[in-house]
Amino acid sequence: MEKSSVAQRIRAFRKLKGYTQNELADLLGVSIAILGAIERGTRKPDTKIINKISQVLDIEPDELVAVGAR
């Protein structure tokens, strides 16, 4: 199974902004297990968590979910 681009983007932006998984999970109010599953692509993030992640990372939600937008 191919890792989703959303999962890859979340991980990339988290690292770019300098957060550990633990730090981001705390800021989002979710467990590290949930964030880890989202980043591995084994759990699909819903709109609510996408919006929360983008808010914490100070990016637009579209930057996480954009698929073939170019």
Image (cartoon, rainbow, N blue to C red):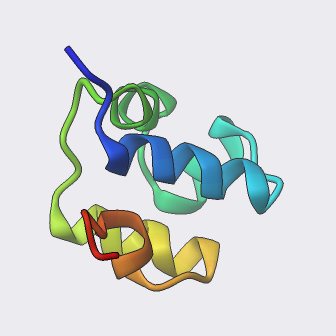
Question: Percent x, y for residue 44?
Answer: 18, 42
Q: Vertical placement of 41 versus 63: above or below? A: above
Question: Percent x, y for residue 39?
Answer: 43, 35
Residue name at image x 62 percent, y 82 percent: 58
Residue name at image x 73 percent, y 48 percent: 15
Quadrant placement of the N terminus: top left
The answer to which of 37 and 15 lies nearer the viewer is 15
The answer to which of 23 and 59 lies nearer the viewer is 59
Count of labels shown?
A: 0
- Can you tell which quarter of the image residue 20 is in? top right
- Can you tell which quarter of the image residue 21 is in? top right
Quadrant placement of the C terminus: bottom left
Compared across the picture, whether 62 is left or right of 23 comes to left
Q: Vertical placement of 39 versus 62: above or below? A: above
Question: Percent x, y for residue 55?
Answer: 50, 81
Compared across the picture, whether 23 is left or right of 61 comes to right
The answer to which of 51 and 69 lies nearer the viewer is 69
Residue name at image x 59 percent, y 61 percent: 27
